Image (cartoon, rainbow, N blue to C red):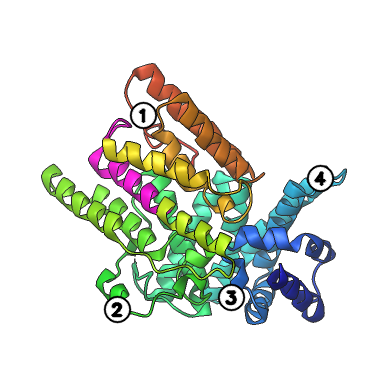
Amino acid sequence: MPVLSKSIDTLVRTAVFEPVFQEILHFYSTYLSRIYYDYAVVNEDTMGWILERFKLSKAGKYAILATATLFWSNYEQSPSTRSLRDHTKELHAIALKQLDLELNSIEVSPQAKLVALEEMTRYEYFANTSSNYFPHLTQSASIVREILQSDTIDLLSLSGDDTHDIRCFAWCDITNSMATSRPTLLNYESNLECTQHFDWEDAHANPSKGIEWIYGCPDVIAVLMARTIALKHLKISREERLSRGAKLEQLIFGWRFRPTHAKGSVMRVARVGVQEMWRHAAIIHIHQAIFRSDPTHSVVRDSVKSIIKIASTLKPGVNPDCFLSIPYFIAGAFAISPKDRYTLKSRIIGCGNEPILRNLAVNLDDVWARTDSTGRFSSWSDKENSAIFF
Protein backbone atom coordinates (compact mmCIF):
# COMPACT_ATOMS: atom_id res chain seq x y z
CA MET A 1 0.00 0.00 0.00
CA PRO A 2 1.99 3.01 -1.26
CA VAL A 3 -0.03 5.56 0.72
CA LEU A 4 0.70 3.76 3.97
CA SER A 5 4.37 3.32 3.11
CA LYS A 6 4.61 7.05 2.45
CA SER A 7 2.93 7.75 5.79
CA ILE A 8 5.43 5.53 7.59
CA ASP A 9 8.30 7.34 5.88
CA THR A 10 6.82 10.65 7.03
CA LEU A 11 6.63 9.43 10.60
CA VAL A 12 10.20 8.18 10.60
CA ARG A 13 11.54 11.43 9.16
CA THR A 14 9.61 13.87 11.31
CA ALA A 15 8.80 12.30 14.65
CA VAL A 16 10.55 11.19 17.78
CA PHE A 17 8.15 8.81 19.50
CA GLU A 18 8.20 6.54 22.49
CA PRO A 19 10.27 3.39 21.81
CA VAL A 20 7.11 1.30 21.66
CA PHE A 21 5.76 3.45 18.84
CA GLN A 22 8.96 2.99 16.85
CA GLU A 23 8.31 -0.74 17.07
CA ILE A 24 4.70 -0.21 16.07
CA LEU A 25 5.82 1.37 12.80
CA HIS A 26 6.54 -2.15 11.57
CA PHE A 27 2.86 -2.86 12.12
CA TYR A 28 1.62 0.54 11.01
CA SER A 29 -0.28 -0.45 7.85
CA THR A 30 -2.60 -2.80 9.75
CA TYR A 31 -3.06 -0.25 12.54
CA LEU A 32 -3.94 2.62 10.20
CA SER A 33 -6.29 0.63 7.97
CA ARG A 34 -8.32 -0.37 11.05
CA ILE A 35 -8.48 3.12 12.54
CA TYR A 36 -9.48 4.92 9.32
CA TYR A 37 -11.97 3.42 6.89
CA ASP A 38 -10.55 5.37 3.94
CA TYR A 39 -6.89 5.17 4.94
CA ALA A 40 -5.81 6.46 1.51
CA VAL A 41 -6.66 10.02 2.57
CA VAL A 42 -3.96 9.89 5.25
CA ASN A 43 -1.31 11.90 3.43
CA GLU A 44 1.64 13.91 4.72
CA ASP A 45 -0.58 16.81 5.80
CA THR A 46 -2.81 14.47 7.76
CA MET A 47 0.21 12.80 9.30
CA GLY A 48 1.41 16.20 10.47
CA TRP A 49 -1.98 16.71 12.08
CA ILE A 50 -1.75 13.30 13.78
CA LEU A 51 1.68 14.23 15.12
CA GLU A 52 0.26 17.45 16.55
CA ARG A 53 -2.42 15.44 18.34
CA PHE A 54 0.29 13.25 19.78
CA LYS A 55 1.98 16.32 21.25
CA LEU A 56 -1.14 18.22 22.33
CA SER A 57 -2.16 16.00 25.25
CA LYS A 58 -0.13 13.60 27.36
CA ALA A 59 -3.28 11.65 28.17
CA GLY A 60 -4.06 11.48 24.46
CA LYS A 61 -0.50 10.41 23.71
CA TYR A 62 -0.61 7.47 26.11
CA ALA A 63 -4.08 6.54 24.87
CA ILE A 64 -2.78 6.50 21.28
CA LEU A 65 0.10 4.30 22.40
CA ALA A 66 -2.30 2.02 24.25
CA THR A 67 -4.51 1.64 21.17
CA ALA A 68 -1.59 1.01 18.87
CA THR A 69 -0.08 -1.52 21.26
CA LEU A 70 -3.47 -3.21 21.62
CA PHE A 71 -3.68 -3.65 17.85
CA TRP A 72 -0.09 -4.86 17.76
CA SER A 73 -0.79 -7.48 20.40
CA ASN A 74 -3.98 -8.54 18.61
CA TYR A 75 -2.31 -9.20 15.28
CA GLU A 76 1.36 -9.89 16.02
CA GLN A 77 1.46 -13.62 16.65
CA SER A 78 4.65 -13.98 18.65
CA PRO A 79 5.90 -14.96 22.12
CA SER A 80 5.79 -11.27 23.08
CA THR A 81 1.99 -11.04 22.70
CA ARG A 82 1.28 -11.50 26.41
CA SER A 83 3.79 -8.85 27.46
CA LEU A 84 2.34 -6.48 24.85
CA ARG A 85 -1.13 -6.89 26.34
CA ASP A 86 0.23 -6.21 29.81
CA HIS A 87 1.98 -3.11 28.48
CA THR A 88 -1.27 -1.98 26.85
CA LYS A 89 -2.98 -1.98 30.25
CA GLU A 90 -0.05 -0.09 31.79
CA LEU A 91 -0.27 2.59 29.10
CA HIS A 92 -4.02 2.92 29.66
CA ALA A 93 -3.48 3.29 33.41
CA ILE A 94 -0.96 6.07 32.80
CA ALA A 95 -3.38 7.74 30.38
CA LEU A 96 -6.18 7.61 32.98
CA LYS A 97 -4.04 9.33 35.62
CA GLN A 98 -2.94 11.97 33.16
CA LEU A 99 -6.51 12.50 31.97
CA ASP A 100 -7.68 13.37 35.48
CA LEU A 101 -4.95 16.00 35.72
CA GLU A 102 -5.77 17.52 32.34
CA LEU A 103 -9.54 17.60 32.83
CA ASN A 104 -9.10 19.42 36.15
CA SER A 105 -6.58 21.92 34.80
CA ILE A 106 -7.72 25.38 33.74
CA GLU A 107 -4.52 25.66 31.67
CA VAL A 108 -5.54 22.85 29.31
CA SER A 109 -7.80 24.02 26.49
CA PRO A 110 -11.18 22.38 25.84
CA GLN A 111 -9.85 21.22 22.46
CA ALA A 112 -6.90 19.44 24.11
CA LYS A 113 -9.22 17.85 26.66
CA LEU A 114 -11.43 16.58 23.85
CA VAL A 115 -8.42 15.12 22.03
CA ALA A 116 -7.53 13.24 25.21
CA LEU A 117 -11.08 11.95 25.69
CA GLU A 118 -11.45 10.96 22.04
CA GLU A 119 -8.25 8.92 22.07
CA MET A 120 -9.22 7.43 25.42
CA THR A 121 -12.66 6.32 24.26
CA ARG A 122 -11.15 4.93 21.06
CA TYR A 123 -8.92 2.63 23.11
CA GLU A 124 -11.70 1.73 25.53
CA TYR A 125 -14.01 0.84 22.67
CA PHE A 126 -11.59 -1.60 21.06
CA ALA A 127 -10.54 -2.97 24.46
CA ASN A 128 -14.20 -3.42 25.46
CA THR A 129 -13.83 -1.53 28.75
CA SER A 130 -17.37 -0.19 29.05
CA SER A 131 -16.85 0.85 32.68
CA ASN A 132 -14.51 3.58 31.44
CA TYR A 133 -16.02 4.17 28.01
CA PHE A 134 -19.47 5.36 29.14
CA PRO A 135 -18.25 7.95 31.71
CA HIS A 136 -15.65 9.30 29.28
CA LEU A 137 -18.27 9.64 26.53
CA THR A 138 -20.42 11.66 28.95
CA GLN A 139 -17.44 13.88 29.79
CA SER A 140 -16.80 14.34 26.07
CA ALA A 141 -20.36 15.62 25.64
CA SER A 142 -19.73 18.36 28.21
CA ILE A 143 -16.52 19.42 26.45
CA VAL A 144 -18.20 19.45 23.02
CA ARG A 145 -21.04 21.53 24.46
CA GLU A 146 -18.46 23.99 25.83
CA ILE A 147 -16.62 24.23 22.51
CA LEU A 148 -19.73 24.68 20.37
CA GLN A 149 -21.65 26.71 22.97
CA SER A 150 -24.63 24.62 21.94
CA ASP A 151 -26.43 21.35 22.64
CA THR A 152 -26.86 20.73 18.92
CA ILE A 153 -24.44 19.35 16.35
CA ASP A 154 -24.91 19.80 12.60
CA LEU A 155 -22.81 16.87 11.45
CA LEU A 156 -23.17 17.70 7.75
CA SER A 157 -21.94 21.28 8.16
CA LEU A 158 -18.97 20.72 10.47
CA SER A 159 -15.67 21.16 8.64
CA GLY A 160 -12.01 21.67 9.43
CA ASP A 161 -9.41 19.54 11.15
CA ASP A 162 -10.31 21.21 14.44
CA THR A 163 -13.75 19.55 14.27
CA HIS A 164 -12.38 16.01 13.93
CA ASP A 165 -12.92 15.08 17.57
CA ILE A 166 -16.40 16.61 17.61
CA ARG A 167 -17.33 14.50 14.59
CA CYS A 168 -15.87 11.39 16.22
CA PHE A 169 -17.81 12.12 19.39
CA ALA A 170 -21.02 12.51 17.37
CA TRP A 171 -20.55 9.07 15.85
CA CYS A 172 -19.86 7.47 19.23
CA ASP A 173 -22.86 9.24 20.75
CA ILE A 174 -25.20 8.06 17.98
CA THR A 175 -24.02 4.45 17.94
CA ASN A 176 -23.96 4.24 21.74
CA SER A 177 -27.59 5.36 21.80
CA MET A 178 -28.46 2.76 19.17
CA ALA A 179 -26.90 0.09 21.38
CA THR A 180 -28.49 1.19 24.64
CA SER A 181 -31.79 2.63 23.31
CA ARG A 182 -31.16 5.75 25.37
CA PRO A 183 -31.33 9.34 24.08
CA THR A 184 -28.20 10.82 22.57
CA LEU A 185 -26.16 13.06 24.86
CA LEU A 186 -26.44 15.95 22.38
CA ASN A 187 -28.95 16.80 19.66
CA TYR A 188 -28.34 16.30 15.94
CA GLU A 189 -29.94 18.55 13.35
CA SER A 190 -28.92 18.89 9.70
CA ASN A 191 -30.62 20.23 6.59
CA LEU A 192 -30.69 17.22 4.29
CA GLU A 193 -32.02 19.32 1.43
CA CYS A 194 -28.78 21.27 1.34
CA THR A 195 -26.74 18.10 0.85
CA GLN A 196 -28.55 17.45 -2.42
CA HIS A 197 -27.16 20.71 -3.82
CA PHE A 198 -24.00 21.16 -1.74
CA ASP A 199 -20.74 19.78 -3.18
CA TRP A 200 -20.67 16.91 -0.72
CA GLU A 201 -19.49 14.12 -3.01
CA ASP A 202 -15.89 14.19 -1.77
CA ALA A 203 -16.81 14.51 1.90
CA HIS A 204 -16.27 10.83 2.59
CA ALA A 205 -12.70 11.18 1.32
CA ASN A 206 -11.93 14.52 2.95
CA PRO A 207 -10.40 14.42 6.45
CA SER A 208 -11.87 17.84 7.27
CA LYS A 209 -15.49 16.74 6.74
CA GLY A 210 -17.89 14.07 7.88
CA ILE A 211 -17.33 10.67 9.45
CA GLU A 212 -17.63 8.31 6.47
CA TRP A 213 -13.90 8.38 5.77
CA ILE A 214 -13.29 7.39 9.41
CA TYR A 215 -16.02 4.84 10.15
CA GLY A 216 -17.46 3.85 6.76
CA CYS A 217 -21.06 4.90 7.44
CA PRO A 218 -22.43 7.50 4.99
CA ASP A 219 -22.84 10.81 6.80
CA VAL A 220 -26.50 11.15 5.83
CA ILE A 221 -27.25 7.69 7.24
CA ALA A 222 -25.60 8.70 10.53
CA VAL A 223 -27.85 11.77 10.67
CA LEU A 224 -30.95 9.69 9.89
CA MET A 225 -30.05 7.15 12.57
CA ALA A 226 -29.77 10.05 15.03
CA ARG A 227 -33.23 11.20 13.93
CA THR A 228 -34.55 7.70 14.54
CA ILE A 229 -33.19 7.77 18.09
CA ALA A 230 -34.69 11.22 18.72
CA LEU A 231 -38.05 10.08 17.37
CA LYS A 232 -38.04 7.05 19.64
CA HIS A 233 -37.75 9.27 22.72
CA LEU A 234 -40.02 12.08 21.55
CA LYS A 235 -43.17 12.47 23.66
CA ILE A 236 -45.80 12.17 20.94
CA SER A 237 -48.67 9.83 20.17
CA ARG A 238 -47.96 6.37 18.80
CA GLU A 239 -49.74 7.26 15.56
CA GLU A 240 -47.58 10.34 15.04
CA ARG A 241 -44.41 8.35 15.86
CA LEU A 242 -45.29 5.68 13.30
CA SER A 243 -46.12 8.32 10.69
CA ARG A 244 -42.80 10.09 11.15
CA GLY A 245 -41.01 6.75 11.22
CA ALA A 246 -42.51 5.84 7.85
CA LYS A 247 -41.18 9.11 6.39
CA LEU A 248 -37.72 8.38 7.80
CA GLU A 249 -37.84 4.91 6.31
CA GLN A 250 -38.71 6.36 2.90
CA LEU A 251 -35.81 8.81 3.18
CA ILE A 252 -33.34 6.04 3.95
CA PHE A 253 -34.66 3.77 1.21
CA GLY A 254 -34.65 6.53 -1.39
CA TRP A 255 -31.41 8.35 -0.59
CA ARG A 256 -28.92 8.36 -3.47
CA PHE A 257 -25.38 8.05 -2.21
CA ARG A 258 -22.56 9.90 -3.87
CA PRO A 259 -20.19 7.63 -5.81
CA THR A 260 -17.15 6.34 -4.00
CA HIS A 261 -13.69 7.38 -5.14
CA ALA A 262 -11.42 4.44 -4.35
CA LYS A 263 -8.66 4.09 -6.93
CA GLY A 264 -9.05 0.35 -7.46
CA SER A 265 -12.22 -1.05 -8.99
CA VAL A 266 -12.45 -3.86 -6.41
CA MET A 267 -12.35 -1.44 -3.47
CA ARG A 268 -14.72 0.95 -5.24
CA VAL A 269 -17.33 -1.80 -5.67
CA ALA A 270 -16.77 -2.95 -2.08
CA ARG A 271 -17.42 0.54 -0.73
CA VAL A 272 -20.64 0.83 -2.71
CA GLY A 273 -21.66 -2.39 -0.99
CA VAL A 274 -20.74 -0.92 2.39
CA GLN A 275 -22.98 2.09 1.76
CA GLU A 276 -25.88 -0.22 0.96
CA MET A 277 -25.17 -2.33 4.03
CA TRP A 278 -25.46 0.75 6.25
CA ARG A 279 -28.71 1.65 4.48
CA HIS A 280 -30.17 -1.73 5.42
CA ALA A 281 -28.82 -1.52 8.99
CA ALA A 282 -30.56 1.86 9.38
CA ILE A 283 -33.81 0.36 8.05
CA ILE A 284 -33.64 -2.51 10.54
CA HIS A 285 -32.89 0.00 13.30
CA ILE A 286 -36.08 1.93 12.49
CA HIS A 287 -38.08 -1.27 12.73
CA GLN A 288 -36.42 -2.09 16.06
CA ALA A 289 -36.74 1.39 17.59
CA ILE A 290 -39.95 2.80 16.07
CA PHE A 291 -42.13 0.10 14.55
CA ARG A 292 -41.18 -2.61 17.06
CA SER A 293 -41.23 -5.13 14.22
CA ASP A 294 -40.25 -8.75 14.69
CA PRO A 295 -37.86 -10.72 12.45
CA THR A 296 -40.69 -12.04 10.27
CA HIS A 297 -41.56 -8.57 8.94
CA SER A 298 -40.92 -8.58 5.19
CA VAL A 299 -38.83 -5.38 5.16
CA VAL A 300 -36.69 -6.57 8.05
CA ARG A 301 -36.27 -10.00 6.51
CA ASP A 302 -35.24 -8.51 3.15
CA SER A 303 -32.71 -6.18 4.78
CA VAL A 304 -31.15 -9.04 6.75
CA LYS A 305 -30.82 -11.04 3.53
CA SER A 306 -29.33 -8.03 1.72
CA ILE A 307 -26.67 -7.55 4.39
CA ILE A 308 -25.75 -11.24 4.21
CA LYS A 309 -25.58 -11.07 0.41
CA ILE A 310 -23.34 -8.00 0.43
CA ALA A 311 -21.12 -9.54 3.12
CA SER A 312 -20.54 -12.56 0.88
CA THR A 313 -18.75 -10.27 -1.59
CA LEU A 314 -16.31 -8.89 1.02
CA LYS A 315 -13.12 -10.54 2.19
CA PRO A 316 -13.47 -11.15 5.95
CA GLY A 317 -11.23 -9.41 8.45
CA VAL A 318 -9.73 -6.69 6.28
CA ASN A 319 -10.77 -3.21 5.20
CA PRO A 320 -13.67 -2.51 4.59
CA ASP A 321 -15.11 -5.62 6.29
CA CYS A 322 -13.43 -4.82 9.62
CA PHE A 323 -15.63 -1.69 9.95
CA LEU A 324 -18.95 -3.55 9.63
CA SER A 325 -19.48 -5.19 13.00
CA ILE A 326 -22.47 -2.92 13.77
CA PRO A 327 -24.47 -3.79 10.62
CA TYR A 328 -23.60 -7.46 11.14
CA PHE A 329 -24.83 -7.30 14.74
CA ILE A 330 -28.05 -5.46 13.91
CA ALA A 331 -28.86 -7.92 11.12
CA GLY A 332 -27.82 -10.84 13.32
CA ALA A 333 -30.23 -9.83 16.07
CA PHE A 334 -33.09 -10.21 13.58
CA ALA A 335 -31.81 -13.36 11.87
CA ILE A 336 -34.10 -16.37 12.17
CA SER A 337 -32.50 -19.39 10.55
CA PRO A 338 -29.50 -21.14 12.16
CA LYS A 339 -27.59 -20.65 8.90
CA ASP A 340 -28.12 -16.88 8.84
CA ARG A 341 -27.32 -16.59 12.54
CA TYR A 342 -24.11 -18.54 12.11
CA THR A 343 -23.11 -16.46 9.09
CA LEU A 344 -23.61 -13.11 10.80
CA LYS A 345 -21.99 -14.13 14.08
CA SER A 346 -19.03 -15.47 12.10
CA ARG A 347 -18.76 -12.18 10.23
CA ILE A 348 -18.64 -10.25 13.51
CA ILE A 349 -15.91 -12.46 14.94
CA GLY A 350 -14.12 -12.40 11.60
CA CYS A 351 -13.94 -8.58 11.58
CA GLY A 352 -10.81 -8.77 13.72
CA ASN A 353 -9.27 -9.80 17.02
CA GLU A 354 -10.52 -6.95 19.20
CA PRO A 355 -12.30 -7.78 22.49
CA ILE A 356 -15.27 -5.60 21.50
CA LEU A 357 -16.06 -8.07 18.71
CA ARG A 358 -16.19 -11.00 21.10
CA ASN A 359 -18.51 -8.96 23.32
CA LEU A 360 -20.85 -8.36 20.39
CA ALA A 361 -20.85 -12.07 19.55
CA VAL A 362 -21.68 -13.01 23.15
CA ASN A 363 -24.51 -10.48 23.24
CA LEU A 364 -25.85 -11.85 19.97
CA ASP A 365 -25.99 -15.31 21.52
CA ASP A 366 -27.88 -13.79 24.45
CA VAL A 367 -30.43 -12.09 22.16
CA TRP A 368 -31.09 -15.36 20.36
CA ALA A 369 -31.37 -17.33 23.61
CA ARG A 370 -33.95 -14.90 25.02
CA THR A 371 -35.87 -14.84 21.73
CA ASP A 372 -35.94 -18.63 21.44
CA SER A 373 -36.85 -19.23 25.08
CA THR A 374 -39.77 -16.79 25.13
CA GLY A 375 -41.05 -17.38 21.63
CA ARG A 376 -41.06 -13.67 20.87
CA PHE A 377 -38.38 -11.33 19.55
CA SER A 378 -36.06 -9.93 22.22
CA SER A 379 -34.09 -6.84 21.24
CA TRP A 380 -30.49 -6.27 22.31
CA SER A 381 -31.70 -3.28 24.35
CA ASP A 382 -34.35 -5.21 26.31
CA LYS A 383 -31.90 -6.64 28.83
CA GLU A 384 -31.41 -4.56 31.98
CA ASN A 385 -27.87 -3.42 32.80
CA SER A 386 -26.63 -4.50 29.39
CA ALA A 387 -22.93 -3.87 28.81
CA ILE A 388 -23.29 -3.77 25.05
CA PHE A 389 -21.97 -0.79 23.13
CA PHE A 390 -21.37 -0.18 19.43
C-alpha separation, residue under disc 4 versus residue under disc 3: 39 Å
Q: Does residue 288 belong to the magenta stretch?
A: yes
C-alpha separation, residue under disc 1 versus residue under disc 2: 41 Å
Q: Amino acid at mark 4?
A: Gln
Q: Earlier in the sequence, mark 3 or mark 1?
A: 3
Q: Amino acid at mark 2?
A: His
The residue that mark 2 highlights is 197
Give the x, y percent position of residue 362: 54, 32
Q: Are marks 1 and 4 in contact (CB under 8 Å)?
A: no
Secondary structure beneath dot 2 equals helix
Which residue lies at the image location 61% right of the left edge and 60% below the top edge? Answer: 35
Q: Nearer the viewer, mark 4 or mark 3?
A: 4
Q: Is residue 281 visible?
A: yes
Query: Which contiguous range is marked in magenta?
Result: 278-297
Give the x, y percent position of residue 101: 63, 65
C-alpha separation, residue under disc 2 versus residue under disc 4: 49 Å
Crowd rating for badge 2 (residues with CA inside 10 Å; few <14, some 14–19, many 20+) = few
Q: Quadrant of the N terminus?
A: bottom right
Horizontal placement of 289 versus 213: left or right? left
Give the x, y percent position of residue 219: 40, 65
Q: Nearer the viewer, mark 3 or mark 2?
A: 2
Q: Nearer the viewer, mark 1 or mark 4?
A: 4
Secondary structure beneath dot 4 equals loop
The residue that mark 4 highlights is 77
The residue that mark 1 highlights is 378
Q: Earlier in the sequence, mark 1 or mark 4?
A: 4
Horizontal placement of 270 versus 58: left or right? left
Q: Nearer the viewer, mark 2 or mark 4?
A: 2
Q: Which mark is residue 260?
A: none
Q: Are marks 4 and 3 in contact (CB under 8 Å)?
A: no
Q: Earlier in the sequence, mark 1 or mark 2?
A: 2
What residue occupies the far front of the structure in this picture? 265
